[in-house]
Image: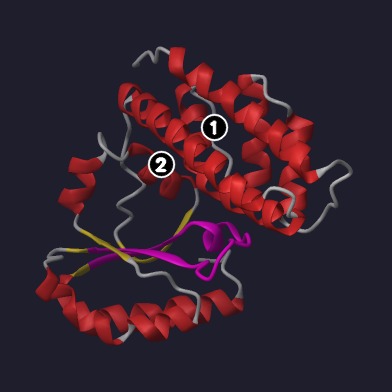
Amino acid sequence: MEKRNEHMKKVADEFLQNVKSCFGENLQSVILYGPAARDENAPGRFSIHFLVVVRDNTPSALAPCSVFVKKWAKKGIAVPLFLTQEYIRDSLDTFPLEFMEMKSSYQMIFGEDVLGTITFQGCDVRSECEREIKGKLLHLRAEYLLHRGNRKGLIDLIHRSLNTFRLVFAGALFLKKSAIPEKTAELLKAMSSEYGLNEELLDTLHGIAHGGKKPDKDTDRLFDLYVEELDKLSKALDVFCPTEE
């Protein structure tokens, strides 16, 4: 709670009042996660993400929130995840990376801390890591063709992709039984150390994406080097054999 700045506190408090008015006793938890919880900038229109845990998330139970969706969007709030505790428990083997990403950086706004107690199995994490990084690399290469030679477009693509690859990076560190840093810069540093990636390159790309650095090389060449490092990680995950404690 203390980590939230005044603006974020105001947004979160107002959001909480909105969902309380919609769900009443049906509401169990409200959790801020993602870039806003890390106090980082996010690419795109929506930078504020909430997990809302309810006892009933049938369409009819969620319907009262429809009147707030446009209002939330104007404040940069993405459509929240409305989940039940049962769904979270039953989905940890299918979507471990998504929940691990939430757990790596979140702030409690209201109710029970449903993320604090969840655990993950190495085989589930490794399976989704392999699937996600290979799929994301396919999309990354395809989107590159739309921005080739466009410095601004490529920088934006790097920014967006680093954000989407966070969940794979977190999972990869989990497989090494390494701590998962909250801040993206520290996450990239830990990844480089554990998997032998080019730390200087990833740090440069993170700095460029967030406007703190200017590329000293051709942007297309930097992108090539970036994809090479992701390919290296993909191959490492492909042969990784997790051991359960």
Q: Which residues are magenta?
A: 28-53
Q: Nearer the viewer, residue 241 or 104?
A: 241
Left or right: residue 239 versus residue 41 is left
Q: Is residue 130 above or below residue 34?
A: above
Badge 2 crowding class, 10 Å Cα cut-off, few under 14, some 14 to 19, many 20 or more, is many
| Residue at the image position 28 percent from the left and 87 percent from the top | 67
Residue 46 among those drawn in magenta: yes
Q: Nearer the viewer, residue 116 or 225?
A: 225
Q: Kindly identify which residue carries mark 1.
A: 179
For label 2, the SS is: helix
Left or right: residue 154 versus residue 241 is right
Query: Where does residue 57 sit, x and y in percent of width and height?
Result: 15, 65
Left or right: residue 196 versus residue 221 is left
Q: Is residue 144 above or below residue 106?
A: above
| Residue at the image position 65 percent from the left and 52 percent from the top | 147
Type of the residue with mark 1: Ala
Q: Kindly identify which residue carries mark 2.
A: 100
Which dot, 2 or 1, sits closer to the camera? Answer: 2
Residue 95 among those drawn in magenta: no
Type of the residue with mark 2: Met
The disc placed on residue 199 is none
